[in-house]
Amino acid sequence: MNMAPPPFLLLLGLLLSSPLFATQVIADDCAAVKAKYHCPDKKHRLHLSFDDGVGSVTDKVLDILKREKIKATFFVLGNKIDCSQYSSGKSLTLCQQRFKTLQRIKREGHDIGSHGYQHLHHSELAANELKQTLLKSRQILAPYLTTEPPIFRLPYGDGWFNRKEKPLAMQTLKQLGFEHIAWEMTAYDWNEKFQQGDKILDNVLDQMCSGRGRDGVVLFHDGVHENEHEGRLFTANNLARWIPKMRCVADFKPLLHFKKKLKKR
Ligand SMILES: [Zn+2]
């Protein structure tokens, strides 16, 4: 019996697999993305940042960034890679894995900043306690911080959002030589109500393209601060799908493109 496919199917297969067809599909997809979010022809500029790691999904995020040739910034919690807390057992093994991932982040050319030693409301701390915890995060992360001055992002935007009423956290960071890095856009990927379909992508592209539009740093999460061993699964599982759509309307830039005060260490 002759099992060869009919000629029209062969022709269709050839057409679908041709580079010309693939380019056209991408162009059509991008036209749809641009129309959906009302983005201008001129591309925005974007930098991805990830808070609350090092998490169990950070390696997956790194794989995606590597494939897409994107350099991002990771704001790491000191206690997640401080393996001196554990003497043995599963916690030590997991900590050692996270520590290896931290080394990989640096090796692959991303930027690393501190998110504190613990995920605290820093503006609620007394002056001495605040200073001690900031120094502890710097001490543990020092070999891995990639910029001069070293960068820091306060958890909860705390002390940055409310810096007029509670200036101590921002003042102390400055005294200790940290540069605080906030964000221009936020994915709200920590919020479960957005963890479905493309709602997180919608959050980013709506902020980027609506009104006068925004360029700059976007806040994502690769860790779950309440649980040191967890990662933001939904973000890690969907990032590979979202990046090409972001690329339709934005060019990815390194952190130093936006933060001219910083130098690479
Ligand atoms: Zn955080």
Image (spheres, rainbow, N blue to C red):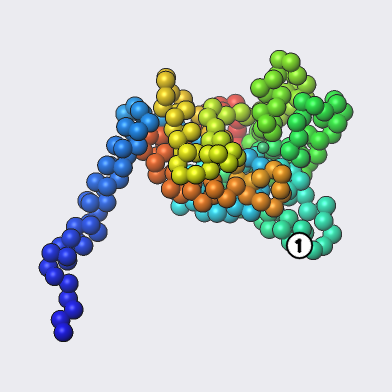
Relative to 71, is 113 on the left or the right? right
Residue 8: x and y in percent read 13, 64
Which quadrant would residue 18 be assigned to in this image?
Answer: bottom left
Q: Vertical placement of 60 versus 44: above or below?
A: below
| Residue that sits furthest to the bottom in the current view | 1
Q: Residue furthest top?
A: 164
Residue in view at x 43 percent, y 48 percent:
241
Residue tagged 1: 90
* Percent position of residue 243, x then y: 44, 43
User: Residue shown at 66%/48% (left/top)?
Assistant: 54
Residue 134 in view (yes/no): yes
Q: Dot 1, how many residues are within 10 Å of its Cα: few (below 14), some (14-19), or many (20+)?
A: few
Figure quarter occupied by ligand 1: top right
Asked if residue 245 lies left or right of residue 72, the reply is left
Q: Residue furthest left?
A: 7
Q: Extreme front residue here?
A: 193
